[in-house]
Amino acid sequence: MKKSLMRGFHCISKGAIKEASQIFDTQYFLSPQDLDARFGKIFCDIGLQNLGKGVGMGDYYFMRRRERRAEELVEEMEAMIAKVSTQEDQEVKEALKIALNQAESLECITLEDFKRYMARQKNFKEAFEDFNLSTKIVFFSKDELCEFLNLLVEKGLPALTLQYAEAFGTDMDPRIYNILQKAVKQNNEGQ
């Protein structure tokens, strides 16, 4: 394991999640295939939402990593992360149900309703701008968020994709990271 990544895991262990996140973000950007950087980023994201879980998972990975190569831990770590993600998705769904029930007076629609509406429009960009001024889209999972961000990139709105991703915070799920890379590339090509 690279020294900088070891330093990142030590930061996680101390609860210095933001500092660790900067280290892992940099290393992941330089080498997206580096499993230590990838898992470090994920544990930081978890730690930003729940410090105890993030620290515990980071410490556990670092301990296991001393015994095995990163490639040997992929299946075990992904299963552990999936379990946490499933729990969080369930918590988010419950919170969204409560929020939607309390906010019925707000203009909100689901991603499916949004896609049906946009499919009936002739000009996606113009329709989206009109739509976006008065209505909020509710996402019930990271999968829906990824689908939405991909749709914006596909429809030629990379800058808007980046704005949405920024508004949703620092969650760097590998799928979101890949979408953002496409958006940045498309945005740079358009300038």
Image: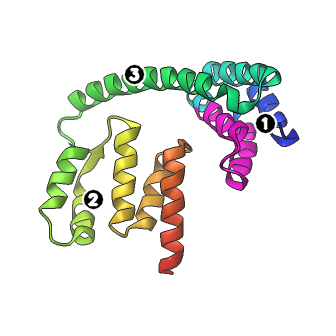
Provide the secondary structure element on which disc 2 rests: helix
Q: x, y percentage for residue 104? A: 18, 35
Residue at left 48%, top 55%? 179
Q: Residue 172 vs residue 3: left or right?
A: left
Q: At label 1, which amino acid type do we have?
A: Gly
Q: Secondary structure at mark 1?
A: helix
Q: Which residue is mark 2?
A: 132
**Which is more N-terminal, label 1 or label 3?**
1
Query: Which tag, 1 or 2, sits closer to the chain's start?
Result: 1
Distance of mark 1 from mark 2, alpha carbons?
39 Å
CB contact under 8 Å: marks 1 and 2: no
Camera-near label (2 vs 3) is 3
In the image, residue 146 lies at what x, y percent?
Answer: 40, 47
Which of labels 1 and 2 is toward the front?
1
What's drawn in magenta, residue-wise?
A: 19-45
How far, Cα to Cα, is label 2 from label 3?
Answer: 27 Å
State whether residue 45 is above or below residue 50.
Answer: below
Name the residue that disc number 3 marks.
91
Residue 109, horizontal then vertical, whole percent: 21, 44
Residue wearing tag 1: 8
